Image: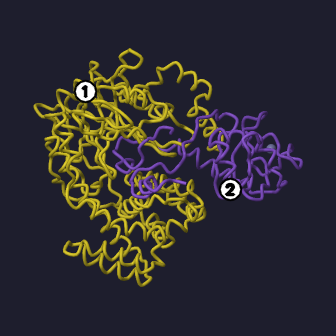
Chain colours: A yellow, B purple
Amino acid sequence: MIGVQLEKLVAEAPAGVEEALALADGFDDALVHGLARMNDVQAAAVAALAGALGASPLGPAAAEAAAKIASGSVSEEHLVALAGARTAVFGAVHDALLAHLDGALGRERDAWEAAPQAPSGDALAGSRSWLQELAITGWRGVGDELVSAADQTLETLWDAPATRGTAMLLDGLAAELRAASPIATMDVVPARRWADLWARALLARPVAARPAETVSGRLLPLGVEVQEHGTAVQMVMHAVLETGGATRLVRTSVAAPKVDTIVGPAVWRLLHRYPLFLKAVAEHRCVEVTGLPLTAGGDLLWSEEGAAIRAATDPFVTARVQLAQATAPAVPPLDRHPVRIAEPVLLEDYSVADGVLTLHGHGLALDLDRLPAGGSVTPELVAASTACIGLLRWDGRWSLQVLGARGKVKRTEVEAHNGDWAQGPTDPKVLKAEARTGDAVAVLRERAGRLLRK
Amino acid sequence: MLDSQESAARERRSTVRVVPPVRPRKLAKVPFVELADGRLQGVVSSGSDIARVYVSSVAAGSRTFSCSTNNNRPCGGLRGAPCKHLQALVAEAVLQYGKERVARYLRVEAGPDDDLVRLLDGGQESAQAAVVFSRFLRHLSYLELPDTTEPVAEMHWFPAMGTP
Ligand SMILES: [Zn+2]
């Protein structure tokens, strides 16, 4: 990414984003207090959100839902209509932001052409009735008992592959509601975040990822991001895929359930069934993939059987040589939300001060919060870096999530990437700390082996 | 108190940290600790019998405490004052969550030099060990669930966040 691209990205903002988000904010505030007892201001805000969809196919149902809910009838059907309206607003914001980003970077992107998939069964009915209770009660009114009411539903959602994503999401939400207790007196309720999670779960349908094609070729890693909460972790490798003439941006990932006491570099141990994935990540190996499914959304479904480890690569070279010509994948309709924007970029010859990266006089905020705890990429390295690979993200403003960085720390050239410790920490200090706390995964597996099967 | 810019950021962002970070600790002695349902509660491995565990808990507010085996047999070490299992539970909770968070949850006024266990003056009560024990088994069962290489788009809302 060069100076003029950054200038285009941050100096102009796509029109209408602020206004659209203001509509969602009104609804989110109503959800904080509960939809069962809205005051006039909140009812007007909900009606405004529905009204914004006036001419679209969702419009009439949303308007009816807003009116019915204002009169005190908070049915599941009406909530789904309003969640749909809110999701459509974020979808439009997402599209505007992504088009703006693609324009600034000159990035080509595939169009979404896959036909919608029919859901199988209705395994999410229990989850929807819990979400309905939450909406009736409002975040401020949620207590431990209502949170625990989701436990049983969650167990069944974890069991089926098609609902596992929703299980991970709801588990994360439930843990946050528990940690924030008592929410009634909480300083600031994370209104947008919880409404996001609520709407996403309410609209979820049991659908498995359907591959659009199978591909073979060379996979060149750019970097890896860590996504985690108390009971789940997902490692997402961003990479360039070369398949007979075409160069594409793809992601490939492994996700595993966990518990909250498995933290820091220890989380990599949960992926022990994927040694080749871990090797590729830790050693920046080129991977020759054979017959792997690729979804229309750009997700390559990893399989150890379809992967062969080849030579070590330099992610900075991959980024410099391949990023400009790689085609980005389309975004699946349900995933159109600004939180999903994560575009790999390479930045060089910039300066860093106070958490802002400056290139040719244009600043980009560094999302240093997103560096995984106890990882090898530190805020100090990022501050001292002169080159980095990161993901462009948007959450109210553009920011950069760093995946790997290179720079001079105390006069020595240092390079670090998020996945450096995928096969175990290499830093003696971190190894020592790990030896002190012991292998959390092994201890808990032993306890599970002894106590669970009795 | 947060300043207004920071509160606006928390209110109107899709990704903010809500759950405070958990610090790594040795799990062998106290494999499970949680602040839930108005209690600090958890499971303590028996020092003598590898197949036995104790369920210990402290109620927020009243500061009453209990300890028994997972089969509901009362703990012999509990005679009006917190036993060694309760002491271990509190010590590990402090490691995991930090003393301030544990004290706030239990509604105990604790100064920087106070030992939390000494402030548990509510006396003994009998509590349902079975509920806590089944929560522990549920906790362990997460490690038995399958991993997946199917993409989980929902996890974009949960970026790993370093310790602040
Ligand atoms: Zn005891």
Which mark's residue is nearer the viewer, 1 or 2? 1
Q: Residue furthest top?
A: A412
Does residue A380 lie above or below A123 as drawn?
above
Quarter holding the N terminus of chain B is: bottom right
The residue carrying pointer 2 sits among few (fewer than 14), some (14 to 19) or many (20 or more) residues within 10 Å by Cα, namely few
Q: Nearer the viewer, residue A157 or B11?
A: B11
* Whether labels 1 and 2 share one chain: no
Spatial CA span between label 1 and label 2: 58 Å
Residue B79 % position (x, y): 89, 47
Which residue is farthest bottom? A71
Residue A126: percent from left, percent from top: 46, 65
What amino acid is found at the position of numbered circle 1 in the picture? Asp
Q: For the residue labelled by badge 2, is the local secondary structure a helix, a strand or a loop?
A: helix
Left or right of A122 on screen, residue A180: right
Report the amino acid beneath label 2: Val
Which residue is at the far right? B79
Q: What residue sits 37% from the left and 47% below the top?
A: B156
Which quadrant of the view contains residue A358? top left
- Side (left or right) of B35 relative to A167: right
Label drawn at residue A150: none
Q: Dot 1: few (<14), some (14–19), or many (≥20) neighbours within 10 Å?
A: few
Asked whether mark 1 and ligand 1 are closer than 8 Å, the reply comes as no
- Disc 1 target residue: A349
Dot 1 lies on which element?
loop
Above or below for A329 versus A332:
above
